Amino acid sequence: MGFDQESRGDPFRGDYPGRPEHESRDEYEARVQRGVVALTQRRYQPAIRHELLRLLNERRRVRGEPGASPREHPGGFAAAVREIGFLPVQTGFDTLLTSGELLITGSSYDGRRSPDGAPGPGPSAKGYLDDIGMEVREVDCADLRGRVLRLIPAGERPMTSQQLADVATTLRARGFAASLSYVTPTAPVGKGGMGAPQPADPPAGPPQFGDGSGNPANVAIIDTGRSDQVRTDGWLQGISGGIDPLDRFPLPNGDGYLDLAAGHGTFVAGIVRQVAPRARVTAYRAIDSDGIGTEVRVACEMIRAVKEGRAHIINLSLCCQTHDDLPPIAMRAALEVIGEWEREHGREVLIVAAAGNYGDSRPSWPAAFRRVVSVAGLASDMRPAPWSSRGFWVTCSAIGQGVRSTYVEGRESPLLDPDPRNFGPDAWGVWSGTSFTAPQIAGALARLHEEYGYPLREALGRLLAAGQPVPGYGQALTILPGV
């Protein structure tokens, strides 16, 4: 497939439908603009950010009778982050972390030179950590054991977030690979107050292109999981994997409203299906339905998607910023494991990640890793979106303002939208953020792989060659329209 100058920036011109003609432009634009304003302003509103974090923590504290346990859901898991810690800032976004622990590589902890557990002659952080009262524990992920370890303060008095950050800084100054254990949310402080999805009409029908004779790509979506609600419109037919419970918070029994990030994975899956209708999509649940997950859980699901799911493309509509702008330990280890698997099996895996909604040029992870395809956000007119993260580390960008996709049935929480809305069966919605630009690129790569037989790296090169360069936003591409 070649792209001529007329299609520059719009490689699939005419293939994807825009807004249905009968929809009210003014109504949609007003709703989307309110969400965009929230995305843009939140970095300047520390009081609102901290109240949202307080609410998120309150929602994950178990209520009820003594001994009550979190309500589980088939395919679900107990809240991986019981308490969200944070390092506060006045302007920007607070660094989110798992309270009470650090991460360190196995080689830094005891001097080993390989992940098989054999000790080596290298320098060891063990003595220092013993002296300051830090205990070592394995992470809850078989593929990372030996590579990444958890450090927990001994005794009954926990360390504050700042104390943990100071220990991590000291370890790095001594030459050891250690960091905070980062939370990797679907938005800088979860989706709460960051622009809720709005009901929308579905597109006219599935796009028509290709003859279906190619080999579909396996696309893994690591997110909140998929809804198990029955849809009759066929858009998500055949998508398998982890289930998004939609309404489990506050623990243990919920409040009857959709959780603050409910349907996020379903929305992402619908975008992939709109761009590449024949892609084989599998959902992996690493983020809870309030939009919160740990980097260890995300890293573990990345490896599982490759080893068990044989994923060709991994979509990560999640990210975090670190307090020192250095890469998270567990995610870096996951990329190493995936790279080893690629070399051993002679296959390639493309990882596509949202650049983030931080509105600045600081790196977001995992998007900023060199081997990851990072995707920033554009407004519907293809201009740079001010709410999007950007920088030299961004690979490309797509429209992320008012993107339409599949959603879930239920009623919004008043915590998310002061004018909560009901979503009926076969719901569609419009939503904004780089969470919804990354799956457009993942879908485009899947389409090029299937329709033209391009190896994944060649598909990526051809797609990027069709973009328009925008400073800080990489190669700008029109795929799905926005509002």
Image (cartoon, rainbow, N blue to C red):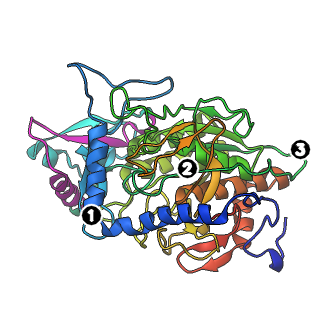
Q: Quadrant of residue 151?
A: top left
Q: Is 277 on the left or on the right of 178, as rendered?
A: right
Return the x and y of residue 198 as percentages of the image width and height: 56, 52
Residue indicated by mark 1: 46
Residue indicated by mark 3: 213
| Distance from Cα at disc 2 to Cα at disc 3 | 30 Å
- Magenta stretch bounds: 143-172
Task: Label 3, secondary structure: give it.
Answer: loop
Quadrant (top left/top right/bottom left/bottom right) for the N terminus: bottom right
Q: Is 27 on the left or on the right of 279, as rendered?
A: left
Return the x and y of residue 354 as percentages of the image width and height: 53, 58
* Count of numbered badges drawn on the protein: 3
Pick whichever of labels 2 and 1 is earlier in the sequence: 1
The residue shown at (36%, 64%) is 42
Return the x and y of residue 11 as percentages of the image width and height: 77, 67
Pick whichever of labels 1 and 3 is earlier in the sequence: 1
Residue indicated by mark 2: 339
Give 369 or 483, whichever is nearer the viewer.
483
Task: Label 1, secondary structure: give it.
Answer: helix
Q: Are marks 2 and 1 in contact (CB under 8 Å)?
A: no
The residue shown at (58%, 70%) is 378
Tag in front: 2 or 1 = 1
Say few, some or many: other residues with alpha carbon within 10 Å of mark 3 (under 14 / 14 to 19 / 20 or more).
Answer: few
Q: Amino acid at mark 3?
A: Ser
Pick whichever of labels 2 and 3 is earlier in the sequence: 3
Residue 299 falls within the magenta-colored stretch: no
Quadrant (top left/top right/bottom left/bottom right) for the C terminus: bottom right
Tag in front: 2 or 3 = 3
Q: Is residue 394 visible?
A: yes
Residue 144 falls within the magenta-colored stretch: yes
Give 126 or 113, whichever is nearer the viewer.
126
Q: Which mark is residue 480?
A: none
